[in-house]
Image: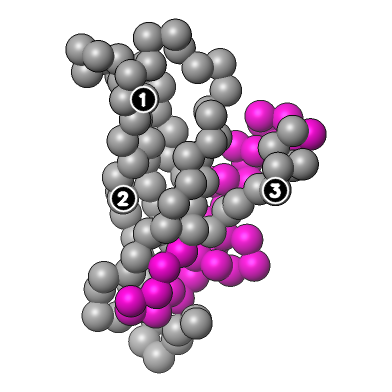
């Protein structure tokens, strides 16, 4: 299962290293799986088919994102994110994605 979306910088200054959490639960709210990723790390369909899960998880853990996409994110700008899960539990009923953390970027540095 692949979850994708965009996270917005709602702060009034640039931020970096946006980290998110996805949680998969059953109908009773029991946590079945959980993953943390850094924004800005995406895969093509071919990469998802051909890379090992270990390689995928390693790339999703890159703090700065691909090509620095998760560094110096200007106020009001968005960064894409992606979660990849394998071996989904049969009782999966719901998933949630929440921001976990970010860091303020040094003053005067922004990206478009």
Residue bearing mark 3 = 44
Q: Is residue 67 toward the left or the right of residue 70 in the image?
A: right
Q: Can you give x and y, in whole percent of width and height, for residue 20 in the image?
A: 38, 47
**Is residue 38 in sight in this rendering?**
no
Asked whether the residues under the numbered discs 3 and 1 touch, taking CB atoms below 8 Å apart as contact, a structural biologist would say no
Q: CA distance from mark 3 to mark 2?
A: 23 Å
Residue bearing mark 2 = 99
Q: Can you give x and y, in whole percent of width and height, for residue 46 in the image?
A: 77, 41
Up the image or down, 85 lies above or below 29; here it is below
Up the image or down, 76 lies above or below 23; here it is below
Residue bearing mark 1 = 24
**Neighbour tally class for label 3: few under 14, some 14-19, many 20 plus, Cα within 10 Å:** few
First in sequence, mark 2 or 1: give its number: 1
Q: Is residue 84 toward the left or the right of residue 36 in the image?
A: right
Asked whether 57 or 28 is in front, the reply is 28
Q: Which residues are magenta?
A: 50-79
Asked whether the residues under the numbered discs 2 and 1 touch, taking CB atoms below 8 Å apart as contact, a structural biologist would say no
Up the image or down, 55 lies above or below 39; here it is above
Mark 3 element type? loop
Residue visible at 25% across and 73% down? 11
Asked whether 102 or 6 is in front, the reply is 6
First in sequence, mark 3 or 1: give its number: 1
**Is residue 67 in sight in this rendering?**
yes
Q: Quadrant of residue 51?
A: top right
First in sequence, mark 3 or 2: give its number: 3
Q: CA distance from mark 3 to mark 1?
A: 23 Å
Whether residue 112 is in magenta: the answer is no
**Neighbour tally class for label 1: few under 14, some 14-19, many 20 plus, Cα within 10 Å:** many
Up the image or down, 52 lies above or below 105; here it is above
């Amino acid at each position: 299962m692949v979850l994708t979306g965009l996270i917005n910088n709602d702060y009034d200054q640039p931020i970096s290293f946006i980290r998110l959490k996805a949680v998969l639960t059953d109908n009773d709210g029991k946590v079945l799986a959980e993953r943390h990723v850094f924004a800005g790390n995406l895969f093509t369909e071919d990469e998802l088919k051909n890379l090992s899960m270990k390689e995928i998880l390693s790339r999703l853990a890159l703090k700065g994102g691909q090509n620095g996409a998760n560094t110096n994110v200007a106020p009001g700008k968005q960064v894409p994110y992606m979660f990849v899960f394998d071996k989904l539990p049969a009782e999966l009923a719901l998933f949630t994605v929440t921001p976990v953390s970010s860091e303020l970027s040094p003053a005067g540095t922004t990206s478009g």
